[in-house]
Amino acid sequence: MSAKVVPFKPEQPERAPSLDPMLAQTASAMNAVNTVILDRMQSEIPLIPSLAGHLIAGGGKRLRPMLTLAGADLIGYQGTRHHKLAAAVEFIHTATLLHDDVVDGSDLRRGKAAANIIFGNPATVLVGDFLFSRAFELMVEDGSLKVLKILSGASAIIAEGEVDQLTAQRQIETSEERYLSIIGAKTAALFAAASRIAAVVAERGDAEERALDDYGRNLGIAFQLVDDAIDYSSSAAEMGKTRGDDFREGKMTLPVILAYARGDEDERRFWKAAIGGHRTTPEDLAHAIRLIERHDAVAATRERARHFAERAVDALAIFPESKARMAMAEAARFAVSRGY
Amino acid sequence: MSAKVVPFKPEQPERAPSLDPMLAQTASAMNAVNTVILDRMQSEIPLIPSLAGHLIAGGGKRLRPMLTLAGADLIGYQGTRHHKLAAAVEFIHTATLLHDDVVDGSDLRRGKAAANIIFGNPATVLVGDFLFSRAFELMVEDGSLKVLKILSGASAIIAEGEVDQLTAQRQIETSEERYLSIIGAKTAALFAAASRIAAVVAERGDAEERALDDYGRNLGIAFQLVDDAIDYSSSAAEMGKTRGDDFREGKMTLPVILAYARGDEDERRFWKAAIGGHRTTPEDLAHAIRLIERHDAVAATRERARHFAERAVDALAIFPESKARMAMAEAARFAVSRGY
């Protein structure tokens, strides 16, 4: 994709977009967030911190709380309220990951055995509930009803998106529009909320809130699109999950939707059988990947992602140029380029 | 138990304690709560209202929201804020039931097939998450940070109690103290919170809040004790769940804890094998029930329940005598006597 990337500052040497500037920008605040996370995942019931810690300490990028921190930096917020709220965002995300692993029967998460494999489904469900409740306790401690409204609303939308995804599973006729609505809910709603609350704690106006919401939402969509592209293009080691998971689970992600739409009758017969769960061997997966490549469906998925990433970058235009804004724009470009 | 019951009004003819007075007292407000419940369990994703409705419309007693309504009545609250909050309480409860059914692999709930059996574990987990989020949305709409604090705190404690119960499963050495701590968290915390918030919306003082909290908490403990007694003493039809579930799952409930404590070496060997999951046939269950009867462990469990029910009744003493108070006191006595 590098040919089309226009760096913010022309003098900057062209290089692959990276998350590093945003990581550097937020590193010191993230230490404070990590302290809150480690402190508030504790419980007198020892299974809770061990299970939660397995995932939380397990090398996630903390991308969602990072958006809260980067947004606060962008608008020059000087306080520390966002540390607790960023931790709440990460707890909500962790709770959904734990429940996802149970829902999907995952084997791997972030390259390690998923929590449900080690601790079983019951404990995984319940510790998810615990973290979800803790997230709300953190928000209540902060005391902003506006933040509570944004994050409880996002949580309900995430759950709706997850149920919708479940309903669409093994449904070959799922459209691109429905797919976008699903990922807009299950993934992008929390990205949007995480970004938006930075403007809320800083007590900025509606325009800033909306701009950060737009940034986060579009970034989230781009992020999920690329995740779904990678599942048909990379190795399990890169992805931290098992390649072909979506294929075996009959998830209607965009690479499949496009390959099916662009395929001939023979190919469509294959896709119906595969998504229906009747052709899920490694050979079937290899065949699926060949069909996806034949129709450039992974590349097209990345192109769609680029579109949303560009919208994310442009949403930041209302803020003055700054290191924070450059880092956030580069994060959006990184979302598109990663996994190549 | 009738010999020991002292009715509030001596002129009232002695009869078995019943929930009917509390049902009558709260009937009209409960209609309003049901409207909120039915309205707010809706979603554009059709699976959500069908799954939620299966349980919500499935004939539960709405005991927890009833406590909020009865409490409001007791203190003469004239507004309607508690309708939404009572619905939020029921949503939290429903979410935990859905997750419990997945955790326990239940077949029956309230005498019908459990949601996980009909809709599968994935949808059941996710709709639980949705209802939980909706509960918080309802609280945010109400706007009381104090109520949010009470109910988010209770939710975290419920999850801790459930995890603790999971940890104690198949652990024959579980003590009565640990058992009381588990049911205090997994059941009584929500009873306490549901009652307490009535005093919060009415903006009464700490004493009223604490009294209602004490009432709810002790009632919840009594209620769970009797539930656990019934699992060794009644038919599945009465209970709405399969008799012997706790036995087969190796749950350390008080009837087992007492029978084990009071048993001889032979009996203890049996209990270790049974709770360990090695003796779970219908004959084993019949033998377990005989041992429990030999040591009056069901009757002792009910006696423990009576103790907590009496504490619940006495907690109401700070409120003037009223129909509402009588109904709440009778509900506590009913909690002990039901299922005989």
Image: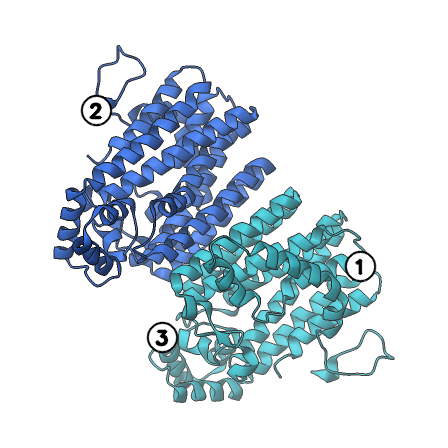
Chain colours: A blue, B cyan
- Marks 2 and 3 sit apart, C-alpha to C-alpha, by 61 Å
Q: Depth-wise, is mark 2 or mark 3 nearer the camera?
A: 2
Type of amino acid at the residue the image marks with label 3: Gly
Pick whichever, B115 or A255, lies toward us.
Answer: A255
Q: Which mark is residue B318?
A: 1
| SS at circle 2 | helix
Please report, as a chain letter, where disc 2 is located. A
Mark 1 belongs to which subunit? B
Q: Are marks 2 and 3 on the same chain?
A: no
Question: Which residue position is annotated with label 3?
Answer: B276
Q: Do the residues indicated by labels 1 and 2 lie within the same chain of the protein?
A: no
For disc 3, the chain is: B
- For marks 1 and 3, give the CA distance: 46 Å
Give the labeled residue for mark 2: A2
In this view, the residue farthest toward the top is: A11
Image coordinates of residue B12 in percent, x first then y, are: 84, 79
